Image (cartoon, rainbow, N blue to C red):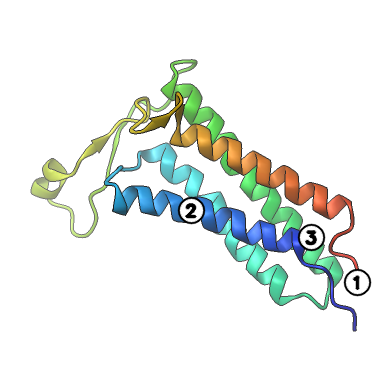
């Protein structure tokens, strides 16, 4: 039995874990409420985490590891593309959603809806050097996807 090198699937697991974790820290640690498009960016990261974890569990099957890692990289890139769209909406380059979202959870009543913060998709809640969280997600997600694809192309998951 051969054991593949696991650089690509490890990056495919670490990148979305860090990005999704950062989103949760910004939401719950710094009270930055996500909008609808923020949630859209999280879903591909969640899928990539599961795919990369399964890839790591299947390390005896190089073909399965490569395929699952490739799909995880695609999911991470999709989150980055959604981030580009969201950042474009924030910068006023194109129109985004016409609705806003709230962070209301649990039983929904008029009181919980009225008390929940309204988060607009076209207004960044936080920026650094003019780059919003959606912009950073796009940069880091697309960079991670490119790194994973490079590692896969170089055969870093082939037998040691």
The quadrant in which the C terminus is found is bottom right
Q: Position of residue 146 (x, y in %)?
A: 73, 43
Residue density around tag 3, few if under 14, some if 14–19, many if 20 or more, within 10 Å? some
Residue with the most extreme left position: 111
Q: Position of residue 113 (x, y in %)?
A: 16, 44
Q: Quick check: marks 1 and 3 in contact, CB under 8 Å?
A: no
Q: Nearer the viewer, residue 83 or 125?
A: 125
For residue 80, above or below residue 45: above
Secondary structure under the numbered disc 3 in the rendered image: helix
* Horizontal side of residue 39 vs 156, given as left or right: left
- How far is the residue under mark 3 from the one under mark 2? 22 Å
Residue with the most extreme front position: 129
Q: Would you name the residue on which mark 2 appears? A: 20
Q: Residue at x 30, y 53 (%)?
A: 29
Upstream in sequence: badge 1 or badge 3: 3
- How far is the residue under mark 2 from the one under mark 1? 31 Å
Residue density around tag 2, few if under 14, some if 14–19, many if 20 or more, within 10 Å? many
In front: label 2 or label 1: 1
Upstream in sequence: badge 3 or badge 2: 2
Q: Would you name the residue on which mark 1 appears? A: 160
- How far is the residue under mark 1 from the one under mark 3? 18 Å
Q: Position of residue 106 (x, y in %)?
A: 22, 59
Q: Position of residue 33 (x, y in %)?
A: 30, 43
* Horizontal side of residue 111 vs 76, given as left or right: left
Q: Would you name the residue on which mark 3 appears? A: 67
Q: Nearer the viewer, residue 57 or 30?
A: 30
């Amino acid at each position: 039995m051969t054991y593949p090198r696991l650089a690509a699937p490890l990056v495919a697991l670490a990148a979305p874990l860090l990005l999704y974790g950062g989103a949760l820290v910004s939401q719950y640690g710094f009270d930055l409420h996500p909008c609808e498009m923020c949630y859209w960016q999280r879903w591909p990261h969640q899928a990539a985490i599961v795919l990369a974890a399964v890839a790591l569990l299947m390390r005896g099957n190089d073909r399965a590891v490569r395929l699952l890692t490739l799909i995880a990289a695609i999911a991470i890139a999709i989150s980055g593309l959604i981030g580009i769209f969201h950042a474009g909406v924030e910068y006023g380059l194109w129109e985004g959603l016409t609705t806003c979202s709230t962070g209301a959870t649990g039983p929904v009543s008029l009181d919980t809806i009225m008390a929940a913060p309204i988060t607009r998709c076209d207004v960044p809640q936080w920026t650094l050097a003019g780059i919003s969280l959606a912009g950073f997600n796009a940069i880091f997600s697309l960079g991670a996807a490119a790194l994973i694809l490079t590692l896969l192309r170089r055969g870093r998951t082939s037998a040691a």
